[in-house]
Image (cartoon, coloured by chain):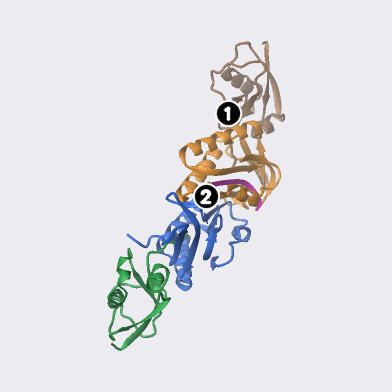
Chain colours: A green, B blue, C orange, D brown
């Protein structure tokens, strides 16, 4: 547990957690999928969302992408612009 | 022109921007808050954006449209914040030499925005509220 | 709203007319005089209309569009007279609840106008002029 | 020759004839096709136009439509609005 990452929350994920950002502790070689698992454990209501993607430094990230300490990480629930 | 704004969208300014001596056609799509969703009366919409990434994603869509159609100018403007009925949430404008390209590019841009750009809309009803698309 | 006008087309007035609490989408098509036709530099266009019949034919097209799509309001405005580069010759606007209908109805109206409505356009070049579509 | 009809001319037909309306004498039971024949004879340059339709009282008319004395008749060269 030596990789703390800050995760930006928007829309329904902000409402469900009551926070616009959370800090999550991950292991050093954590990937996007590890972050999602950790978030689901810590905030069970997130499992009810239709889909949850992760953006790293402003770009959609694949599940196996490695996370780094200074990444800007955001949780992206289903978008509904327009 | 790509923008996210909390202020009302200035249609006249967008139209002026889209004009060009080469442009024979402008297609302008306006997305507006209407008074109901699936027969349920709406009080207002609340739009939220991950601004930095939303701009990036909108730029990707505009770039892709420029690859596919001979676009002269484009305007992609999304508003965020609390919007009442009749207020404009989004403006997409495309100018081209010929009309088919303007229609197709404009529609491509708005259709794709709804799929990939990190902007979220909460419908607020008289008796509840709901983040659109969030639940299965 | 259907009109033939010799004055500049008032886009803001058309937009206000198209708005409605039920309308979630407006598609607005603007046809503009551009500075060339098939690489030949254009000085101006001259539009002429058989007004009475043009209004009737535009009304038929709008009626047909209303049969095919759930249109809330439409605006079909064609200008005539001498138009310089950058001036607007035609505005087609459609408001609907959902965007696909607005795009399709708007495009249907402009495409059909070009086929059936008795309006004629003369392209005036630096070194000559030509009634569009008149010759084989 | 006892049915004089007035024909409105627009666009290229006005330019070719130099007139915005012409009066044509037809026989009493004349049809749209007779009018077109007569016009082509009287104004040979009209034969160079890609297509010529006739409107009667503001509606496109078929070739076999009978013409009446008080009809508003117009020659419709290929349209090019928009």
Q: Which residue is depicted at the point 53% across and 57% down?
A: B94
Toward the viewer: B131 or D46? B131
Residue D53, percent across and down? 57, 27
Q: Which residue is mark 1?
A: D52
Residue B101, percent across and down? 49, 52
Q: Are marks 1 and 2 on the same chain?
A: no
Q: How many numbered markers are drawn?
A: 2
Vertical placement of residue D29 versus C45, above or below: above
Toward the viewer: B82 or C11? B82
Vertical placement of residue A23 versus D13, above or below: below
Q: Which residue is depicted at the point 62% across and 31% down?
A: C53
Q: Quadrant of residue A14?
A: bottom left
Q: Which mark is residue D77?
A: none
Residue D59, percent across and down? 58, 26
Q: Is residue C129 left or right of residue B121?
A: right
Q: Is residue C93 left or right of residue B42?
A: right
Toward the viewer: A4 or B101? A4
| Residue B79 visible in the shown view | no
Quarter occupied by the N terminus of chain C: top right
Magenta stretch prevailing secondary structure: strand
Q: Is residue D5 left or right of residue A15?
A: right
Q: Quadrant of residue C134?
A: top right
Report the span colored magenta: C85-94
Q: Quadrant of residue B128?
A: bottom left
């Amino acid at each position: 547990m030596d990789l703390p990452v800050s995760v930006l929350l928007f829309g329904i994920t902000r409402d469900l957690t009551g926070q616009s950002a959370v800090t999550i502790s991950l292991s050093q070689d954590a990937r996007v999928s590890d972050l999602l698992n950790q978030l689901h454990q810590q905030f069970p209501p997130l499992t009810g969302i239709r889909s949850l993607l992760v953006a790293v430094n402003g770009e959609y990230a694949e599940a196996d992408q490695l996370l780094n300490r200074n990444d800007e990480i955001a949780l992206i629930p289903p978008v509904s612009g327009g | 022109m790509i923008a996210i704004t909390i202020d009302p969208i200035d249609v006249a300014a967008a139209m002026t921007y889209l004009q060009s001596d080469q442009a024979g056609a402008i297609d302008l799509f306006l997305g507006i808050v209407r008074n109901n969703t699936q027969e349920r009366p709406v009080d207002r919409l609340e739009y939220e954006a991950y601004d930095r990434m939303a701009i990036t994603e909108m730029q990707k869509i505009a770039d892709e449209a420029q690859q596919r159609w001979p676009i002269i100018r484009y305007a992609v403007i999304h508003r965020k914040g609390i919007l009442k009925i009749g207020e404009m949430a989004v403006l997409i404008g495309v100018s081209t030499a010929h009309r088919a390209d303007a229609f197709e590019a404009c529609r491509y841009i708005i259709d794709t925005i709804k799929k990939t750009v990190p902007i979220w809309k909460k419908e607020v009803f008289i008796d509840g509220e709901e983040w659109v698309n969030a639940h299965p």
